[in-house]
Amino acid sequence: MIFFLIALIAFLIDQATKYWIATSLTINEQIPVIGNFFLITSHRNRGAAFGILQDQRWFFIVVTTVVLIGIVWYMLKIKKSGNRLLQTALALVLGGAVGNFFDRALTGEVVDFLQFNFGSYTFPIFNVADSCIVVGVALIILDSILEIRREKQQAAEIKQEEQV
C-alpha cells in the first residue's frame, strides 16, 4: 500500500536529518539559515511537545505503541475507502510518530533542530517527525471538515429529491 510507503519515507527523512544533526553539530550549536529567524540548532528533548513531561520515557513508549497500533489498524480498515486525503494524513502521522518513538526507545531522547524566532519569541525547537505529525493532523482536520460538508450536501440532495 502506497500510504505505508509514505510513512516509511517520512520516517527515513526524519532519521537521516536527525543523524546529520547528531553527528555534525554539538548540542546547542547553531547554523543560521535565514538570519535570526530560522536556525538549525542541535537540541535534545527528553519530553514531549514543548518539553513537557521530561524524562517520562516509558510513558511515551507505552502511549506511542498504543497510538501506532491504532493508526495502523485504522489505515488497514479504511484502505478501500478511496479517501486518499485521510490515508495520506494518517501515513504522515504514522511516519512521524515512528520516527520519534524510535529515538525515545533507543536513546531516551529526541533530536530536535528546527528553530524559528519571531522577534524575541523563540518557538520550541522541533524536527521533521514533529512536522509530519502536525501536517498529518491538520490534514485529518481538513478531511473531517470536508466530510461534514459532504454529509450536509448529501442530506440536502435527499431532502430536495423527497420534495419532488
Image (cartoon, rainbow, N blue to C red):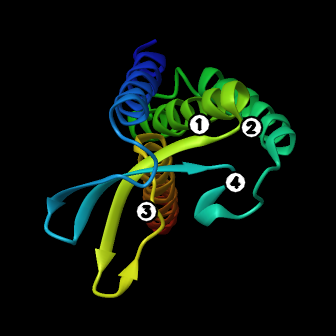
Tag shown at residue 64: 2
Question: Cα distance, mark 4 to mark 3?
Answer: 44 Å
Callout 2 amino acid: Thr
Does residue 120 sit above or below 150 in this rendering? below
Residue to which mark 4 is pinned: 47
Residue 2 in the image: x percent, y percent? Answer: 40, 16
Rendered residue at 51%/30% (across/down) = 95
- Quarter-of-image position of residue 9: top left
Residue to which mark 1 is pinned: 100
Callout 1 amino acid: Asn
Callout 4 amino acid: Gly
Residue 70 in the image: x percent, y percent? Answer: 74, 33
Say few, some or many: other residues with alpha carbon within 10 Å of mark 1 (under 14 / 14 to 19 / 20 or more).
many
Question: Cα distance, mark 3 to mark 1?
Answer: 40 Å
User: Element type at marker 2?
Assistant: helix
Residue to which mark 3 is pinned: 153
Question: Cα distance, mark 2 to mark 1?
Answer: 9 Å
- The reply to whether the C-beta atoms of the residues labelled 2 and 1 are less than 8 Å apart is yes
Rendered residue at 54%/22% (across/down) = 79
Nearer the viewer's eye, disc 3 or disc 2?
2
Does residue 148 sit above or below 87 in this rendering? below
Q: Earlier in the sequence, mark 3 or mark 1?
A: 1
- Quarter-of-image position of residue 23: top left
- Answer with left or right where residue 37 lies relative to residue 85: left
Looking at the rendered image, the quarter that the C terminus falls into is bottom left
Does residue 32 sit above or below 60 in this rendering? below
